[in-house]
Every structure is written in structure tokens, then in C-alpha cells.
Amino acid sequence: MNFQTIVPLKKEIINSIDYNSKILLLGSCFSGNIGDKLNYFKFQTNQNPFGILFHPKAIENLVTNAINGKKYLPEDLILQNERWHCFDAHSSLSSADKNELLANLNSAITATNKKLKEATHIIITLGTSWVYRFIATDAIVANCYKIPQKKFLKELLSVDEIAKSLKTTIAHLKSVNKNIHILFTVSPVRHLKDGFTENMQSKSHLITAIHSVLNTKNCSYFPSYEIMMDELRDYRFYGEDMIHPNKTAINYIWHRFVETQISENSKLTMEKVESIQKGISHKPFNENSEQHQKFLNNLEIKKEKLNSIFNFIKF
């Protein structure tokens, strides 16, 4: 008896990820979950240089600014609650020091420009279609920084607006890296502060818009949201807030990701990496024992063997 409805997935053959791939992840907090898994298994990854970005316009803005080599200036910053912020970035970049924030923003722009040109894969995770427009500048922001809501207009991006934004992002990416593979996914995190119906409307706009651009060469889709909603249709797969996927759900979606997006010849390497990672986290009863010293020596041999094949893998 089958107690699940399984989302059918097509295995990526031509553009699968392996240990030679260079991967950039952009988008919502779920991109961080996938990025952390890729990092754990020692793939070549970089994630969210401007911090978490929830909606397609924020991602388009980052890609555009990185490719154009934008230089952030003091007038691009705003002071709120004794900290300096930039409307283009997540609060993780904010600082009490204006110059530090400017340096971090410009450093991230330079690094992103380089990564976009080098990347073989970019994974873009969209979280919401709801955006906030700062009335004073008429600009859509990536983060509101707890500035009074009366200073913003809340808007729902239409399917056409999202599709246009995605097409712009794709065009910019291919202008500097024509062979880059773009993998879209929609975050399984529900944005219930917008409302239950509003969240479903938001996710449906994202999914519809993404599918309208998938006929573009080297663009594909991984159904993270659909797996959460159908295969994991139970609150035991959510965290205490009943909104975010818990560790079990993240591991399950990661397993489905590996099934379809990771090349077969990389899976043996993943097993070797995991063996070393578990060895590193092992806590001995007696760290001075001969047995443990032999264990550590074997662990170093494993590391050296792997590093001789992939010199970028460091533990």
C-alpha cells in the first residue's frame, strides 16, 4: 500500500552537477538549505552574496548590478535603528559602520561578477511574489528593515511581471556566460504572514512564470515546493512554527535533488566525503588511545586521497 503521492521527476543528464561544477545559489532561505548540503559534500559552491533574497525582482537587481559593476555609494544606504542598511541586500550585511557596509556591498558585487562568469550552474530559489515598494524612491526593495509600513506600498507581482523579470535575469546571465545552466525552484516555505490564500496566489504566480521561461536553452525546474506539498503532506515534516520544513523534510528534498540533479559518477565521491565528515564529528571515549590515533591517521589518509583528486576539497 502506498501512503504518498510521489512527484515524478526527470533526471538531469546533460546539465547534471558533478565535482567539477561551479555552483552559485541565489534566493530565499531554502537556497541556503540546499547550499549547506552541497557545502557539506564539498561541491564548489557560493551562496547568496547579498544574503537571502525572497522575490524575483531582488534577484534580477543583484544580477544586473553585479554584471554592470555597480559601485555602492553613501546615498545608497539608509540608517534605521542605529544600523546602516541597503535596500538591495539582506540585513545580514547591515552594519553600525557605514564604511564597513559599503565595503562589504562593493566586495560582494565584485565577487558576484566573477562567480557569474565562472559558474556552470546557478540555482535560483524564489520565495514570494509579494514585494514592497519604497514610496520615497518608487523602488522595489529586497528588505524593509522594520521601517514603518506606511512608507511602503505592498504589491503582488503579476505572472507577466515575474516572467519579464526572469527573462531579464536569464538574458543578463547569458550575456556574460552563455553556457550557464539555470535551475529554478520555488521555496517550500509558506509566507503565511501575507495570508493563506495570498501565499497560494503568490506561489502560483511564481510557478506559472517560471514555466513560461523553461523553453529557454539551459533552463530547468526542480519542484521543491511540490514535493513539500504532496509527498510531505503532514505537519510532522514542519518545524515548530508550522511554516518552515524541518530537518527531516530538508533531508528528504535533498535526497530527491541528488536523485535527479547530481551525476552518477559523483555519488561515490559523496559517500567518501560523508565518511570523512562523520569521522571528523566523531567524539572518542579516549582521544589519547592507540585505537583513536589509528582512526585519526586513517582519516588523514582518506582526506589526502580525496584531495589528490579534487584539490579544492578542504576539511
Image (cartoon, rainbow, N blue to C red):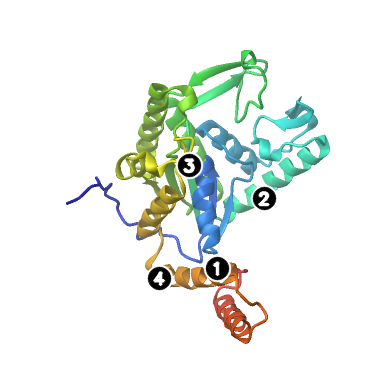
Please identify the quarter of the rendering in which residue 164 is found: top left
Report helix, strand or loop for mark 3: strand
Residue that numbered label 2 is attached to = 111
Mark 2, Cα crowd under 10 Å, few <14 / some 14-19 / many 20+, is: some
Pinpoint residue 211: horizontal percent, then vertical percent: 35, 38
Which amino acid lies under the numbered mark 4 shown in the image of this protein?
A: Asn
Pinpoint residue 235: horizontal percent, then vertical percent: 37, 39
Residue that numbered label 3 is attached to = 125
Distance between mark 4 and mark 1 Cα atoms: 20 Å
Question: Cβ–Cβ below 8 Å for labels 1 and 2?
Answer: no
Mark 3, Cα crowd under 10 Å, few <14 / some 14-19 / many 20+, is: many
Pinpoint residue 135: horizontal percent, then vertical percent: 63, 15
From the image, state whether disc 3 or disc 1 is nearer to you: 1
Residue that numbered label 1 is attached to = 277
Q: Nearer the viewer, residue 240 or 80?
A: 240
Q: Nearer the viewer, residue 177 or 41?
A: 41
From the image, state whether disc 1 or disc 2 is nearer to you: 1
Mark 1, Cα crowd under 10 Å, few <14 / some 14-19 / many 20+, is: some
95 versus 313 height, above or below = above
Residue that numbered label 4 is attached to = 265
In primary-sequence order, the first of circles 1 and 2 is: 2
Q: Is residue 46 left or right of residue 267?
A: right
In primary-sequence order, the first of circles 3 and 1 is: 3
Give the residue displayed 68% in from the left and 44% down from the top.
Answer: 109
Which amino acid lies under the numbered mark 2 shown in the image of this protein?
A: Ala
Pinpoint residue 70: horizontal percent, then vertical percent: 69, 38
In primary-sequence order, the first of circles 2 and 3 is: 2
Distance between mark 3 and mark 1 Cα atoms: 27 Å
Give the residue displayed 69% in from the left and 46% down from the top.
Answer: 108
